[in-house]
């Protein structure tokens, strides 16, 4: 047998076999960034989608067998696609990682962390793991702004009356 494979040939076959075994495991993992969406094409006949931990990821089934997978929190969970009889058509691990941007600046004030999105100017970014006071403040501002926009038909703030009236 050593004449057929040689010393290095046998190692190559073993390495190829290990790669072939490991490759499907990687293919069964979908990586999504927190606060981002990922599109997936599902196999035919999918009737139900199950997410193991909805605090980590969320999934929405769209027409045409398209799944929108959204990263909600850091970590891993599983995704199952079932047919009408409850048979598993697809099983994946969903891994949610940190934000996917080169424009983040993280500031540490002792052990308190603050995250900013800095494209042209730096603005507070609502990021899991930030100091609770900073996170709550940024979230409150975003919620107030979104509520004001929704209450005004999305047209922005009403114009103030001219001075003296």
Image (cartoon, rainbow, N blue to C red):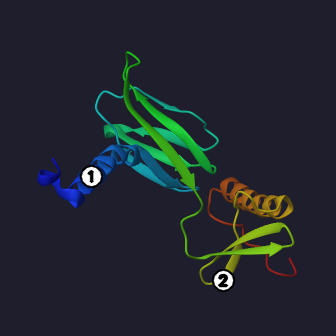
**Residue at label 2?**
121
Report helix, strand or loop for mark 2: loop
For the view shown, which residue lies furthest in the bottom direction? 120
State which quadrant residue 80 falls in: top left
Which residue is found at the position 69% from the left and 79% from the top?
A: 122
Above-or-below relation of 44 to 128: above
Above-or-below relation of 118 to 143: below
- Taking depth in this image into account, of 148 and 132 the one nearest to the observer is 132
Disc 2 or disc 1, which is closer to the eye? 1
Locate the C terminus by quadrant. bottom right
Report helix, strand or loop for mark 1: helix
The label on residue 16 is 1
Image position, residue 94 (x, y; %): 50, 44
Above-or-below relation of 51 to 47: below
Which residue is found at the position 45% from the left and 52% from the top?
A: 38
Whether label 2 touches label 1, CB < 8 Å: no
- Left or right of residue 110, residue 156 in this image: left
Which residue is found at the position 44% from the left and 39% from the top?
A: 92
Among numbered discs 2 and 1, the one appearing first in the sequence: 1
């Amino acid at each position: 047998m050593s004449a057929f494979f040689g010393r290095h040939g046998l190692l190559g076959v073993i390495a190829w076999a290990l790669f072939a075994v490991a490759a499907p495991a990687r293919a069964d993992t979908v990586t999504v960034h927190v606060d981002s969406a990922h599109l997936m094409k599902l196999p035919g006949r999918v009737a139900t989608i199950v997410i193991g931990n909805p605090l980590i990821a969320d999934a929405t089934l769209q027409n045409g067998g398209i799944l929108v997978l959204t990263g909600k929190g850091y970590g891993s969970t599983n995704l199952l696609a079932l047919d009408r009889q409850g048979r598993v058509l697809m099983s994946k691990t969903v891994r949610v990682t940190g934000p996917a941007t080169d424009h983040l600046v993280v500031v540490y004030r002792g052990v308190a962390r603050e995250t900013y999105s800095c494209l042209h100017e730096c603005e507070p970014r609502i990021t899991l793991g930030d100091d609770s006071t900073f996170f709550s403040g940024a979230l409150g501002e975003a919620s107030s702004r979104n509520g004001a926009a929704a209450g005004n038909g999305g047209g922005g703030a009403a114009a103030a009356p001219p001075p003296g009236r």
